[in-house]
Amino acid sequence: MRLRKQREGQALVFPFIDEQINLPSTRYQGSKAKLTPWIWSQISKLDFESALDIFGGTGVVSYYLKRKGKLVCYNDYLKSNYYTGLGLIENNRITLTSEDLEFILGKQVGWSYKHFISETFKDIYYTEEENEWLDMVVQNISTFRNIYKRALAYYALFQACLVKRPFNLFHRKNLYIRMNDVERSFGNKATWDTPFENHFRSFVKEVNNLVFDNGKNNKAFNFDALDIEGDFDLVYVDPPYTSAKGVSVDYLDFYHFLEGLVKYDRWKYLINHKTKHLSFYRQPNPWNYRKQIRDALRTLFERFKESIIVVSYRSDGIPSIDEIASDLTALDKKVTISTFDNYKYVLSNGRTSEVLIIAE
């Protein structure tokens, strides 16, 4: 096995940070926002001009690569994340105007608005007034014919929704955490209590400032990772995390509410009413099953064996680092493993090592 290991980085010390690149705000579990400059430091000398970010998520890695002048293809199976990819990666010049903003935030005369969120999610995530606001805004956004304007507006709405949620998640029915008048050791009640409109305006300003043209025909896709086709110099793989105990991160369960916003007219058909937090019906997904994920990765590696494959992983994940390295070496690739030690993820109970596996 041609395998080389190196260890770089220390806990919460980021010597590679590029102060010139402002990344999108992100509150997603497992985000690589703080680690992206370190990842770039490991791959910047590789010979590649095009890159596929196959589990794109928050888009921070894709955005960083776009800033570095690469032709970037972003992919994510969640439609909500796909809109982030459209707005930040594929979009090169479209922004939201002040007229767009006022249209989104105003109740349109003569319109017959639906009240799905107000009627369905009472006392689950947001207050009654906030639910009514969401019903109005999401229906206004859906009327934009320009898909990039729609994507940017959704992005701002997603971020506003996340900052007003305890833990920035939708995995529990827990509005009471916000509303109870008690001392707290976590969260930011001032942020929770700030009106949705204020947050939305702030995130529109942010996302407008993130839009830029790097001169490349970047694309965003909305496929399962195993359905992507094409030729890419480099394929970046950051799969859902499965712990050593076999517990997987289910992003659809964590962010189903955001997914519902972009599927507003079909939302009622997607909800599993047996769950207290009204999540979506669970969908079969090899990336969330410990007995299937290694075979799924092998299939992915085989499909892109002519590309440089870069895998972001955690040292305590399933499959193991050695198993992944072995599968990549079997494709006659030179494998290098770099480690960022003692990294702390949000909501994680302990520190782990972030690992980058590079197969050339």
Image (tube, helix red, strand yellow):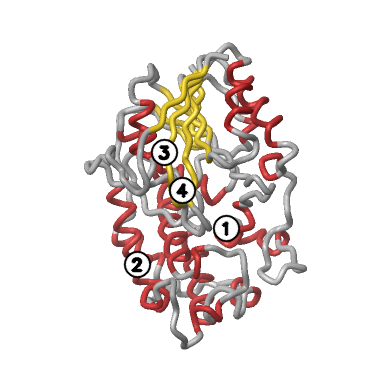
Residue 340 shows which numbered tag?
A: 3
Q: Is residue 90 visible?
A: no
Q: Is residue 95 above or below residue 324?
A: below
Q: How far apart are labels 1 and 2 at the CA level? A: 27 Å
Please give the residue where the numbered disc 2 appears in the rendered image: 102
Kind of residue at disc 1? Tyr
Along the polypeptide, which appears first: circle 1 or circle 4? 4
Residue 31 shows which numbered tag?
A: 4
Q: Position of residue 161 (x, y in %)?
A: 47, 65
Please give the residue where the numbered disc 1 appears in the rendered image: 255
Q: Nearer the viewer, mark 1 or mark 4?
A: 4
Quarter of the image containing the N terminus? top right
* Residue drawn 52% across the image and 64% down it: 139
Along the polypeptide, which appears first: circle 3 or circle 2? 2
Left or right side of 16 for 147: right
Q: Are marks 3 and 1 in contact (CB under 8 Å)?
A: no
Q: Position of residue 58 (x, y in %)?
A: 46, 47
